[in-house]
Amino acid sequence: MADYSNSKQKYYWEDNSGPSIVAKTLSRGRGIPIQQANILLVEDNPVNLKTMELGLRSKVKSIRNAENGIEALEMFKRQHFDLILMDIQLPLMNGIETSREIRKMERNEAVKTPIIAITANFFSNAKEQALQAGVNAFLSKPFTRNTLIEIIEEFL
């Protein structure tokens, strides 16, 4: 595992033994048990949405869904979430732009909401763009439920 640095965040690249690739910032978990977590899932694909909801429903307190970046921003303004799962390829406003806007809204906040970016397009420069936009972790599809849960727990 190599340590990389950029002007915004420190992160490390990890090639999991499973099917996914993960890039993540150094975590600063807040000690929230996963069973108490309120999660915003930003996903427009109905199959991916249902799969992730079914995989997490028994593990977390609540999951709310936004189908695009604009809807996600509106929900974020109205409700507190402990963590955001953000698809990168979204209609109206993509996940990178949405993450950047969330970080602007949190500019004066001492504690930032962890954002885990999810994409099938991990060969592009989306990983670097997402991390520069302020996401805490970048997860490529396909991934296992256990990998997702481990990352969620790390940032809660």
Image: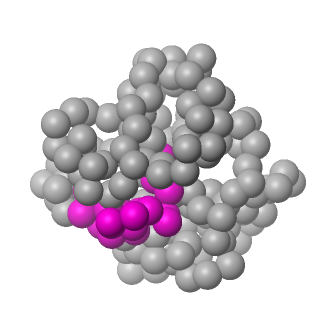
Determine whether, in the image, residue 84 is placed left or right of residue 112: right
Give x and y (percent) for residue 37: 43, 25
Give x and y (percent) for residue 48: 61, 45
Q: Residue at x 71, y 37 (%)?
A: 145
Q: Residue at x 46, y 35 (%)?
A: 156
Could you tell me if residue 58 is visible in this image?
yes
Q: Residue lying at the far left in this picture: please name it.
A: 108
Is residue 70 or residue 138 the one in the foreground? Answer: 70
Vertical placement of 4 versus 81: above or below? below
Is residue 155 or residue 126 the one in the foreground? Answer: 126
Determine whether, in the image, residue 71 is placed left or right of residue 153: left
Q: Residue at x 30, y 49 (%)?
A: 72
Which residues lie in the magenta part? Answer: 83-102
Could you tell me if residue 26 is visible in this image?
no
The stretch drawn in magenta includes residue 74: no
Vertical placement of 125 versus 43: above or below? below
Give x and y (percent) for residue 17: 86, 54
